[in-house]
Image (cartoon, rainbow, N blue to C red):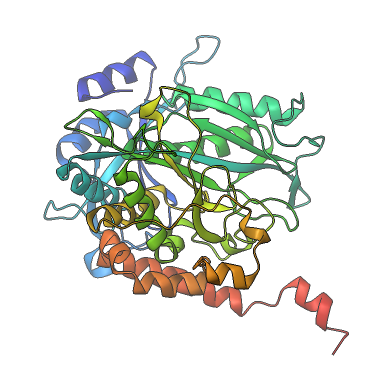
Amino acid sequence: MATTLAGALKLADKHNLRFVSLQFTDIVGQVKSVQVPMHQLEEAVEHGKWFDGSSIEGFARIAESDMFLVPDLDTFSPIPWEPGIGPDGAKSATGSARVICDVFTPNGEPFAGDPRGVLKRQLEKARKAGYILNTGPELEFFLLRRSNGSVEPLPHDAAGYFDLSEDLGTEVRKEMMNGLEAFGIKVETAHHEVATGQHEIDFEYADALRTADNAVTFKTTLKAVAASKGLYATFMPKPFFGINGSGMHTHQSLWDIKRGRNAFSDPKDPYGLSTMARQYIAGTLEHARGMIAILAPLVNSYKRLVPGYEAPVYIGWARINRSALIRIPQISKGSLNSVRIELRCPDPSSNPYLAFAAMLAAGMDGVERKLTPPDAVEENLYHLDAAKLESRHIRQLPGTLREALDELSRDEVIRDALGDHVFERFVEAKADEWDEYRTQVSTWEVDRYLEAF
């Protein structure tokens, strides 16, 4: 990884890199790229690289389409599957690097529709208050094989949660870890997940901007490695009926800059949580319904968020209860800086920049208002009937994307965190998605109703 232009050019020369991909994401989280010869990198760093944003989801209208990209050289790295020097030492004419960029308007202002910029604004707000947000997302995914134009779970994979197996999925997972490490992403663990063909690879816990960048790179890397093996990696939240979907459980904590310690830690508390951590939890619970459209942004997301498949539905918190929206992970004795909360409702189809921005805004609202969370609920929430849930004031997440968008529209804290531009374009795009979905006639409907009525 490079931090200066000279360092990036030296790295490019060392690895015989002829091209650089200037990357950014649109509002819904799709990675976009402008590829230029390596000799254009210096100009891009010093003056930006202009592009037409009128066709980018949620960016600009045609009348205001010109904008430019400025590379963040901290993210400059060779692309491992586009090497400039082969294993045999032969040089390639197509070796490439990538660098993640910030988006600016023609007058030099940060573009309000840039998701990375949205997160940076929230992080700067927290920094002014004296805190750094650290996050650790856990992105689950399925490895699938194409068959006659369709996809199906990876054959020969009958493994379950943490099972030791020697199938193709295990070998692909190792290559994925190598690809991530080549990008400078420090992998911590990798394992098979609950469902057939489902996997998880976890990487290092760090500041939120770095982990958001890593999450974006994570998805593109896994897809590229899978494709090289004739497979397909999908981060779709619920690709198959009747088995677990894929989540993006996100660990969070705040670092106190002045005191140089974890602001969430209090060894005297039964859960190890400081007053501030509890306030942050309260804010997260308060805005859970308002931000779920950002954290679970697809029509399909709400087919994962149902009881019975380890996905949270009820808005509560606990230590050992995995049916709760927020879980407090166990830590090793004396590891006070490891105290954190785990939000379990996000899924990997979300834009990590917007997701982390919404989480931070929600938690900090609880801190600023000194909110008190409800009591922890350690019993399985799925076993409580409607009357018990109501008596304990335990709310549920929205059941559809349409309901989630309505909640987002009513939540001023989350709307303010996104900014008017992103909020309006996001809701517009997702409302269109919902309308297209609700007018479709599914195979289930045809099978159930065609001959019955």
Q: Residue furthest top?
A: 89
Q: Position of residue 125 (x, y in %)?
A: 19, 49
Image quadrant containing the C terminus: bottom right
Q: Which residue is more in the foreground, 344 or 7?
A: 344
Please determine whether, in this image, residue 111 is positioned above or below residue 175: below
Quadrant of the image occupied by residue 257:
top left
Q: Which quarter of the rendered picture does the N terminus lie within?
A: top left
Q: At 33% across and 20% down in the image, what residue appears? A: 12
Could you say which quadrant of the image residue 8 lies in?
Answer: top left
Q: Is residue 26 visible?
A: no
Q: How many marks?
A: 0
User: What is the x, y in percent for residue 4?
Assistant: 21, 24
* Residue depicted at 41% across the width and 28% down the height: 96
Quadrant hosting residue 426: bottom left
Q: Is residue 226 left or right of residue 355?
A: right
Q: Residue at x 53, y 66 (%)?
A: 396
